[in-house]
Image: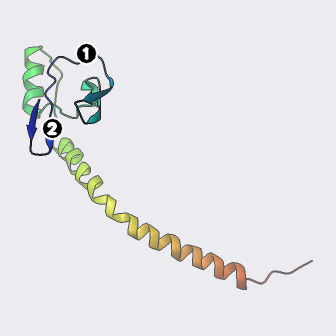
Amino acid sequence: YKMASTNLHLYPGEQIKKAGNYILRNDSNKIGISFNYDRIESETASYSNDELEDIAKSLDVKNFNIDKELSSLFTGGMADLSNSRTLWKLCSIFAIAFFAIETILLRYWKTEKE
């Protein structure tokens, strides 16, 4: 470990074998800390087009093609998803407007009572 001003930097290395909650203590302090197992399946890294072509060549795959235009659509789509977070304001405005229209219609719509 290393103390830097008021921060504690802990370097456990390979000492922690089991995920769980742990308590670090010294003479006057007690700190809770948690360790998780490695989550490799959550990694979002992927192969580039060149890497995929190299892998296909090394495995002698005959029917292999990368559609460059289609892959650019996916990367552009991810950028659109991050920009879509700003649409909540527009959705809120529409929801309030439709609620107001419904309220007006229910109040002033005349129905015949039988």
Q: Is mark 2 on a helix, strand or loop?
A: strand
* x and y percentages locating residue 58 in the rendered image: 8, 15
* Residue at 48% in and 72% down: 94
Left or right of residue 103, residue 15 in this image = left
Q: How crowded is mark 2: few (under 14 residues within 10 Å), some or many (20 or more)?
A: few
Q: Quarter of the image holding residue 89?
A: bottom left
* Residue at 63% in and 75% down: 102
Q: What element carries label 1?
A: loop
Taking depth in this image into account, of 7 and 11 the one nearest to the observer is: 7
Q: How far apart are marks 1 and 2 (CA)?
A: 21 Å
- Mark 1 and 2 residues: CB-CB less than 8 Å, in contact? no
Taking depth in this image into account, of 39 and 101 the one nearest to the observer is: 39
Provide the residue designation for mark 2.
Answer: 8
Q: In the rendered view of the protein, which quadrant contains the C terminus?
A: bottom right
Q: Residues within 10 Å of mark 1 (few under 14, many from 20)?
A: few
Residue 45 vertical placement versus 111 (above, below): above
Which badge, 1 or 2, comes first in the chain's sequence?
2
Residue 87 vertical placement versus 5 (above, below): below
* Residue at 18% in and 33% down: 45
Q: Is residue 99 visible?
A: yes
Q: In the rendered view of the protein, which quadrant contains the N terminus?
A: top left
Amino acid beneath label 1: Lys
Mark identifier at residue 17 = 1
* Residue at 81% in and 80% down: 111
Amino acid beneath label 2: Leu
